[in-house]
Every structure is written in C-alpha cells, then in structure tokens.
Amino acid sequence: MIDISRELQVAMNTGKVTLGYKESLRAIINGSAKLVILASNAPAHIASTVQYYAKIANIPVYVFQGTSWDLGAAVRKPFKVSTIAVIDPGESNILALAGQQSGG
C-alpha cells in the first residue's frame, strides 16, 4: 500500500502536477496527464466528465478515498481539490496507483 499523501508531495516537489478540474481536464485533453486522481465526493458532472475524457485518452483514473477537503490537505493546500492530474511523476511512485484503479 502506497502513502498517497507522501507520493503526491514528492510528485509536486520533483515533477509536475496540476490541481483543479479545469487544469486537469486540459491536461487530459492534450494528452499530457499520466494519471488523474479524483476526490470521492467530486460533483457528479466533474467526475463523469473527467472519467469520460480520461477513458478516451486511455489515462488511468484513481478515485481518492476521501473528500475534496482531504485531497486538498494531502497536497498541503488550504482549499478543496476535486481533481489532480499528474503530468510528470518526478521521483515519486505515484503512477503505481494506476495499477490500483478504482472507478472508471
């Protein structure tokens, strides 16, 4: 079991990660995202849109088992984060989550 919060921190510090629905969707559509992390309580229209485009682009979607507040806290931000796109994992092992896909 990997520590999602720790791996997200490493990815943010050593790689490239986008936070938020619009930025993540842009990364999915242009094909730069390697993994998408979705909060379990993301609004239905956000979750379905992200999963739809990720499926078309063949990008794995991992549903984070926590709220958008928890996901925001995991990346040390004082706000809700519904969607995270990992563009470059850097030195993290975050892409291992792709093997643990849930949802989509």
Image (cartoon, grey):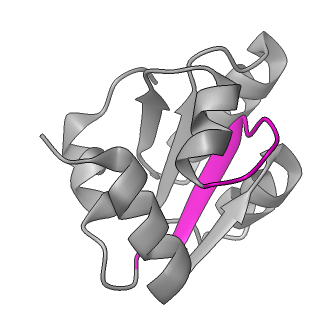
User: Where in the figure is residue 65, as x and y percent of width and height?
Assistant: 43, 21
Rendering coords of residue 99 (x, y %) = 19, 44
> Which is nearer the eye, 81 or 49?
81
Furthest toward the right, the residue is 22
In this rendering, position of residue 48 left or right of residue 62: right
Q: Would you say residue 15 is visible in this rendering?
A: no
Left/right placement of residue 36 relative to residue 20 reads left
- Residue 30 lies, in percent from the top left, at 72, 70
Quadrant assignment, res 48: top right
Placement of 34 over or under 67, stated as above or below: below
Q: How many marks?
A: 0
Residue ID at (78%, 35%) = 80
Question: In the rendered view, does 35 fall on the left or right side of 39?
Answer: left
- Residue at point 87% right, 51% down? 22
72 vs 10: above or below:
above
Q: Quadrant of residue 94?
A: bottom left
Relative to 14, does residue 31 appear above or below in the rendering? above
Q: Quadrant of the image for the N terminus?
A: top left
Residue 75 seen from this side: yes
Residue 100 in the magenta stretch? The answer is no
Residue at (21% x, 55% y) in the render: 96
Q: Which residues are magenta?
A: 76-89
Q: Nearer the viewer, residue 50 or 55?
A: 50
Residue 85 part of the magenta-drawn span: yes
Q: Which residue is painted at 46% across and 30% down in the image?
A: 64
Return the x and y of residue 36 as percentages of the image width and height: 53, 49
